Amino acid sequence: MQKEVVHPDFGEIVLQKKRTNKNIRISIRTFNTVKKVYVSIPWYVSYKNGLQAVEKNTDWIQKNLSKVSKYIYLPLDKKELEEIRKKARIILEKKLDNLANRYYFSYNKLKIKNNRSNWGSCSVQENINLNIRLIYLPEDLMDYIILHELVHLHHMNHSSSFHKELNSILEKHTGDKNFEKKAIKRMHSYKIS
Ligand SMILES: [Zn+2]
């Protein structure tokens, strides 16, 4: 049995009654970047008590709503995926060319990849590979990933010279000396799946 209510701060909340539930338990689930609050309640407890538990835990819910991972899903349909690939190539090629020109890099070819292992990579042939899902990231994170790969054209490793160059470009680009640190943290919430 379940009941849905709209909470003024958290949007739709799903209250679920199950015989196996021993306690009231609040959790947050994600559906294609949309986060929803779930409340599991024992069979004999009223929905009203479930909602009271929500009110008692608003801080926890708020905190966890903002840190839940944002999964990026691609359509399974081949045609739809092809459309997204075309769109990604246009967006990412323009971005890459702009950033390469502005910060004096020259690369060989851009490849749009559909993989789950990385957001981007740079090959010894000086090709830049970018994940098709990048187009769903906020623009400053998209720039961050692309700049990271461009700097690999100068340093094929993650040495201190690599980070020195990347950080100096990021500072010029964003005006923020600590941008990389913050970006790495923000990237943790985006999952490739
Ligand atoms: Zn790297």
Image (cartoon, rainbow, N blue to C red):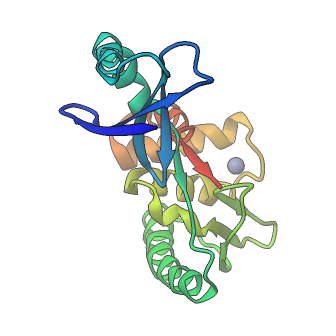
Say which quarter of the image contains residue 3.
top left
What is the quadrant of the C terminus in the image? bottom right
10 lies left or right of 32? left
Residue 101 on image: x %, y %: 46, 70
**In this view of the protein, can residue 109 be seen by the observer?**
yes
Question: Which residue occupies 39% across, 54% down?
Answer: 138
Note whether 136 is above or below 33 in the view shown.
below
Q: Nearer the viewer, residue 141 or 11?
A: 11
**In this view of the protein, can residue 177 be seen by the observer?**
no
Q: Residue furthest front?
A: 44
Q: Nearer the viewer, residue 77 or 174?
A: 77
105 lies left or right of 17? right
Q: Nearer the viewer, residue 14 or 65?
A: 14
Residue 126 on image: x %, y %: 73, 70
Note whether 117 is above or below 97 in the view shown.
above
User: How many numbered marks, from 0 up?
Assistant: 0
Q: Residue furthest left?
A: 8
Q: Nearer the viewer, residue 11 or 24?
A: 24
Q: Residue furthest top?
A: 56
Residue 179 on image: x %, y %: 44, 36
Residue 150 on image: x %, y %: 60, 60
Question: Which residue occupies 63% across, 85% down?
Answer: 78
Question: Which residue occupies 45% across, 56% down?
Answer: 137
Question: Which residue occupies 52% across, 32% down?
Answer: 185
Q: Residue furthest bottom?
A: 79
